Image: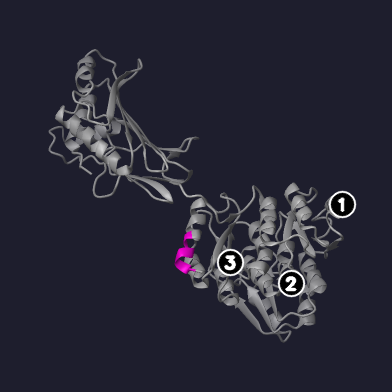
Amino acid sequence: MRKRTATTIICVLALALLLSACELRAEHLVVVEEDGSGTVECLALLDPQEEDVDDFLDGRFADLPNVPDGWTQEAVDDGDFEGTRSKASFSDPAELETLLAALEEANEEAGGVGEPCLGLFTEGDDSLLTVDAVEARWSQQIESDPESDDELGEEISEAVAEAIDLEISVRLPGTLDSHDGDVAGDGTVTWRPTVGEAVDLHASSLLREVTNRVAGPNRYATAAAISERFFEPGVDVAFVAEGRGFADALAASGAAGTQDAPVLLTAEDDLPNETRDELARLDPGRVVILGGPAVVGPAIESALEPLAGEVDRIAGGNRYETAAAVAVEFFDDASTVYVATGRNFPDALGGGAAAAAGGHLLLLSEPDTLPASTRTQLERLAPERVVILGGQAAVDDVVESQIRGLGLAVDRISGADRYETALAVADDAFDTTGTVLVATGASAPDALAGAAAAGQTNGPVLLTRADRLPAGLSAGITALSPGDVLVLGGPAAVSNRTALELEDLLTIAGP
């Protein structure tokens, strides 16, 4: 792209400043379609408040004597501002740069008669606009050199740079996913950069449809969508847990794996339509409510009765006892037992999927002491291995010592954060996998519903940030060589850009 000289910019702006009562505005809009075509519109406007400005308007802001090919140009006078509007259409980004270069050249030949596209010129080798299958990207630098040879000098040029009102808007196709500016309701991103310093402007929008997402508009609908994806009608058991907590659904993950059963979510006193519809489709022989009436109210039990051959409840006096009651109901023996804190969910989410996929049990503990109900089940089952999930803040050395005191072998799996812990669990439990499920690490419901599905996919549930992949996730997924990577939850939980990045890992990992 041609380099626009700072002198030309400063001359025009300085003249505007010296006219003391004159305000210079530059407003531009670039609209880009999915195929890279689009339109560009540039306005250069003055606010005249003295008679002496009229000659300047008639001269410098008159129509170009020779409007370059591809452009149309018209005078603008709305009673407050006067100037020039230039318009053009382009078939691809390269043509946009060519059009802008032609307009710049025409202005220079005419003596700088209005600078109708001030700022829409790039410096260096970077393209003004790039479009590919994933995103459209606008990158821009605007630069004015205060050390130019212009006789007005640095002081005047900096004052002019502060006086200009420069606005550049870019409207890109698809769902706007990241930007560095103000966003309008129609997806237009607008910057108001300062001329006089280099600025880097960026906006992008997704052009490719996200096809690897399993989601609904809320946590209940997402759990139902996961169930529908992985479970056929006629299941023997379906678990129902309260959707605002995490402990009961987490405790059911291992049992869900042994029973080939989904975990669906409910509100405390109102059965969501999505859960009701999915249970009607599943036609389960039995629905198991997890937690007592204070967690899942009697009204839910009544609403579930027409949807299954049998409805019963597994509950204890607290979350630790409920997890233990699940163990009593569904496990006569266990080679491996996972132990997670009952106080918080992050470290345990990956463990729930590992338990479901391996048909193992998951029990809960206080951070600093082993609950009596959990101890009883460990003594009853005498597993070959107990795996503590998370670091000392989750389950400390006191609990580990208490478990070892039962004569059991104990391992601890943890990472620097929840994302690394989930990766470490996956590395321990899975060599390869057909399907990797990825959910947000910021909340529990999507990963909990996904943990039950891990019994069907024989793969892990890994965690991601909403707007970017955490360190190590790409490498971890690639090492598993999955045939599919599915995102659990909607764009608010895992952005479209992140979902596409995960999908693209398949081309690296291979089946």
Q: Dot 1, how many residues are within 10 Å of its Cα: few (below 14), some (14-19), or many (20+)?
A: few
Q: Dot 3, how many residues are within 10 Å of its Cα: few (below 14), some (14-19), or many (20+)?
A: many
- Between the C-alphas of marks 3 and 2, the distance is 19 Å
Q: Earlier in the sequence, mark 3 or mark 1?
A: 1
Question: Which picture quadrant has residue 89?
Answer: top left
Establish if 77 lies above or below 294. Answer: above
- Between the C-alphas of marks 2 and 1, the distance is 27 Å
Please tell me the numbered disc located at residue 258. Answer: 2
Please tell me the numbered disc located at residue 302. Answer: 1
Q: Quadrant of the N terminus?
A: top left
Please tell me the numbered disc located at residue 435. Answer: 3
Please tell me the numbered disc located at residue 386. Answer: none
Q: Please state which of the two labelled residues, at mark 2 or mark 1, is closer to the viewer.
A: 2
Establish if 283 lies above or below 350. Answer: above
Q: Residue furthest bottom?
A: 407
User: Which is nearer the eye, 200 or 30?
Assistant: 30
Q: Are marks 2 and 1 in contact (CB under 8 Å)?
A: no
Residue 102, image x and y in percent? 22, 35
Residue 179, image x and y in percent? 43, 45
Q: Could you say whether the residue bearing mark 3 is in a helix, strand or loop?
A: strand
Q: Could you say whether the residue bearing mark 1 is in a helix, strand or loop?
A: helix
User: Which is nearer the eye, 36 or 160?
Assistant: 36
